Amino acid sequence: MSSVATKPVPAAEASDGSKSSEEEETSIGRQAGRSALETGANEKKQARDLVYAIVENQRGVLHRISGMFRAKGFNITSISIGESSSPDLARMTIVPKGDEAALQLLVKQLQKMIDVIEVGTIRPADAIERELALVKFETRDMKSKNEILELSNNLGARAVDVSRDSLVVEFTATPERIDYFINEASKSGAIKEIVRTGLTALRKGL
């Protein structure tokens, strides 16, 4: 099930941006994160829930959270962050790679960060998922250019730059649809560059 946890009033705070805890918990967390996220995928079912966090919108927050992921050995498929409905807060969407135990451990560690206000998970069935991609193609002739433009129109993408020998397409969709577009369009024109924002998501309904 989707879950959400709002952080209680912080106790003692450490200088690295996380709450103080026992030495053995840090060691156990690091070992568990690495084993569950890096090598446990072959034996345990991969968790598919997304993780979101409401964090303080200030300098260094992303660096501190990324540093925690690295220190604990978490494997992250993508992470995106942007200003939320309040200018003082930012919303982070994290796509973890690992089993359910690793997912819960990641959420637990995020809850300890002093910059994190709220942490929750969203099941894919309950989520509206989107990603933005910019794809630059080399198009040496009109035939290849028109084929990519036709595919773009059919899928809901749009050309944002057209020159004599290149074409840049913007596509906002689910990661799966973006993967499909890239695979199909590459048959008509050589891909020169791809930029993807990473997944962002909201829960359906109120």
Image (spheres, rainbow, N blue to C red):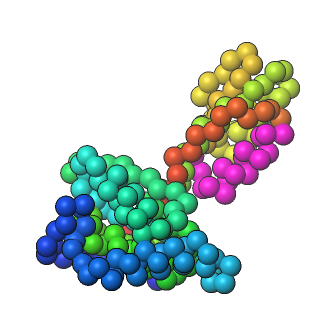
Depth check, front residue: 158 or 165: 165
Please count the marks in the image: 0
Q: Is residue 85 visible?
A: no
31 drawn magenta: no
186 drawn magenta: yes
Q: Main secondary structure of the magenta part?
A: helix
Outermost residue toward the top in this view: 164
Image coords of residue 35 (percent x, y): 54, 78
Q: Is residue 17 above or below residue 107?
A: above
Dividing the picture into quarters, in which one does residue 53 lie? bottom left
Q: Which residues are magenta?
A: 172-187
Residue at image location 22% in from the left, 71% down from the top: 19
Left or right: 45 in relation to 129: right
Query: Quadrant of the image for the C terminus?
Result: bottom left
Image coords of residue 127 (percent x, y): 50, 67
Q: Is residue 138 above or below residue 28?
A: above
Left or right: 108 in relation to 170: left
Image coords of residue 160 (percent x, y): 59, 28
Q: Is residue 68 visible?
A: yes
Residue at image location 52% in from the left, 81% down from the top: 100
Residue at image location 34% in from the left, 69% down from the top: 110
Image coords of residue 52 (percent x, y): 40, 65
Residue at image location 27% in from the left, 72% down from the top: 112
Q: Is residue 79 above or below residue 171?
A: below
Left or right: 186 in relation to 92: right
